[in-house]
Image (cartoon, rainbow, N blue to C red):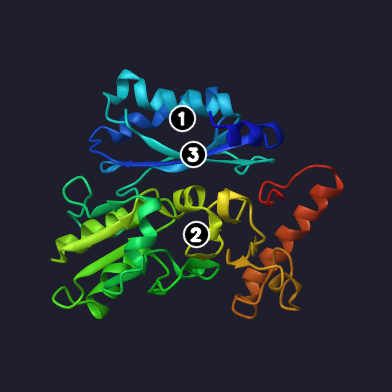
C-alpha cells in the first residue's frame, strides 16, 4: 500500500473500486448468486454487470472488505482463473457512495449493440497514461471522447472531438457519418475507466481502421498517474456514483447533480433560478410533463420529511 493510500484511509473511510474485464464467461448467469453472496457477506454495495463478454462495475465498502471481494473474484475456483488478472482503480469517500448491492445479468457489459464486436477477438493498442500526452499531441491523431454528452460537458482532453452521443449505441452511426478509414489513419479514444473506449477500438478495427489507440485505465487512471502540472485534461471527470465528479489525484470535485434529469451541475448552475433541488435544473427546466414534475415534487417532499426525522430517504443523494 502506498503512503498516499495510507494517508487517505486515515481520513476517508470507504474504498471505491471500479473494475472491468473483457473475458469469455459462458457461465455468467451461474456466477450471479455467488458474487452477490460474497459482496453481501462483506457488506459491499454497488453495481456489477455480468455478460458472456465479461464483468464490469463499481463497488464500495471498508478497505479490508473490498480487498477480500477482489481476492475472491481473482482466486475462487468458480471463476477458473478467468479473473486472475482483474484490474481495478481505487478512490476514497467519507460516506458510502451506494445504497445497495446489485449484480445484473446483461447481453453486454457495455452496450454497443453491434453483434460480434469484442475486445477478446481484436482490440486497439493500449496506451499507458504516461505515454498519452505524446500520442494525442501528434497532429495526425484524431482524438475522440467516447463518453456521453453530459459526461463530456464537465471535462475532457484538450482538442478532443465530442460526438454528442446520448448512449454508446449511437457511436457506430457517428463513426459512419464522420470518419473515413482511408483518410483518418490514426485514431485515439478515451473514456472514464477504459472499458467503453476498449470496445470502441474493437469496433473501429472491425470497420477497417488500422491504427487505433485507447487510453489504458481510462481518464481515472490518467488523473491518478499524470501530475496536474503536466496534464492535458481540462475540467472534472464525471463518475457514476454519489461523488458526481473527480479531479486530479481522484479528489472529489465541485459538481453536484440534478436528480430530475441526472445532468451534472456546476456551483454556478446550482444558483440558477431554474434549479430546484430534486425537481429541475437549467438543463431540464420546462421539459418534463406536469405529471412527472408532480412526482418529483412529491419525492423531494419525502426526502425533506426523512431529514426532519433524522433519517435518509431511499432516493436521497449522499452528501460529499
Q: Is residue 140 above or below residue 86?
A: below
Q: Read off the residue under disc 3.
A: 102
Is 293 displayed left or right of 49 in the figure? right
Asked if 186 appears above or below 53 in the picture, the reply is below
Q: Mark 1 = which residue? A: 36
Q: Quadrant of residue 93?
A: top right
At 73% across and 61% down in the image, what residue appears? 298
Q: Considering only order in the chain, which callout, 2 or 1, is on the residue closer to the N terminus?
A: 1
In the picture shown, does residue 268 fall above or below 238?
Answer: below
In the image shown, does 135 or 121 lie closer to the viewer?
Answer: 135
Is 240 on the left or on the right of 267, as rendered? left
Using a 10 Å C-alpha cutoff, classify the residue at mark 1 as few (fewer than 14 neighbours), some (14 to 19) or many (20 or more).
some
Give me the residue at 45% from left, 71% from top. Answer: 158
**Coordinates of residue 232 in the picture (x, y in percent):** 47, 64
How many discs mark residues in the rendered view? 3
Discs 3/2, front: 2
Amino acid at each position: 500500500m502506498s503512503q498516499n493510500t495510507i494517508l487517505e484511509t486515515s481520513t476517508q473511510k470507504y474504498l471505491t473500486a471500479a473494475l472491468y474485464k473483457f473475458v469469455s464467461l459462458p457461465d455468467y448467469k451461474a456466477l450471479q448468486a455467488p458474487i452477490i453472496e460474497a459482496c453481501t457477506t462483506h457488506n459491499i454495495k454497488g453495481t456489477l454487470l455480468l455478460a458472456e463478454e465479461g464483468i464490469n462495475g463499481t463497488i464500495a465498502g471498508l478497505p479490508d472488505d473490498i480487498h477480500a471481494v477482489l481476492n475472491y473474484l481473482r482466486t475462487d475456483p468458480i471463476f477458473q482463473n478467468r479473473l486472475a488478472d482483474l484490474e481495478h482503480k481505487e478512490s476514497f469517500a467519507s460516506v458510502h457512495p451506494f445504497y445497495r448491492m446489485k449484480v445484473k445479468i446483461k447481453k453486454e457489459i457495455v452496450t454497443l449493440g453491434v453483434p460480434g464486436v469484442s475486445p477478446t477477438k481484436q482490440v486497439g493498442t493500449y496506451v499507458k497514461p504516461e505515454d498519452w500526452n505524446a500520442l494525442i499531441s501528434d497532429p495526425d491523431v484524431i482524438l475522440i471522447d467516447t463518453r456521453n454528452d453530459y459526461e463530456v460537458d464537465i471535462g475532457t482532453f484538450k482538442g478532443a472531438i465530442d460526438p454528442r452521443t446520448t448512449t454508446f449505441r449511437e457511436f457506430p452511426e457517428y463513426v459512419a457519418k464522420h470518419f473515413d478509414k482511408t483518410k483518418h489513419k490514426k485514431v485515439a479514444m478515451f473514456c472514464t475507466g477504459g472499458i467503453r473506449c476498449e470496445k470502441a477500438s474493437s469496433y473501429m478495427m472491425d470497420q477497417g481502421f488500422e491504427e487505433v489507440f485507447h487510453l489504458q485505465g481510462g481518464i481515472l487512471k490518467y488523473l491518478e498517474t499524470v501530475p496536474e502540472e503536466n496534464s492535458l485534461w481540462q475540467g472534472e471527470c464525471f463518475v457514476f456514483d454519489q461523488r458526481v465528479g473527480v479531479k486530479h489525484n481522484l479528489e472529489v470535485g465541485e459538481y453536484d447533480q440534478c436528480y430530475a434529469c441526472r445532468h451534472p451541475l456546476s456551483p454556478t448552475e446550482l444558483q440558477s433560478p431554474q434549479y430546484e433541488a430534486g425537481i429541475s435544473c437549467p438543463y431540464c427546466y420546462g421539459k418534463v410533463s406536469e405529471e412527472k414534475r408532480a412526482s418529483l415534487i412529491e419525492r423531494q417532499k419525502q426526502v425533506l420529511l426523512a431529514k426532519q426525522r433524522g433519517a435518509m430517504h431511499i432516493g436521497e443523494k449522499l452528501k460529499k
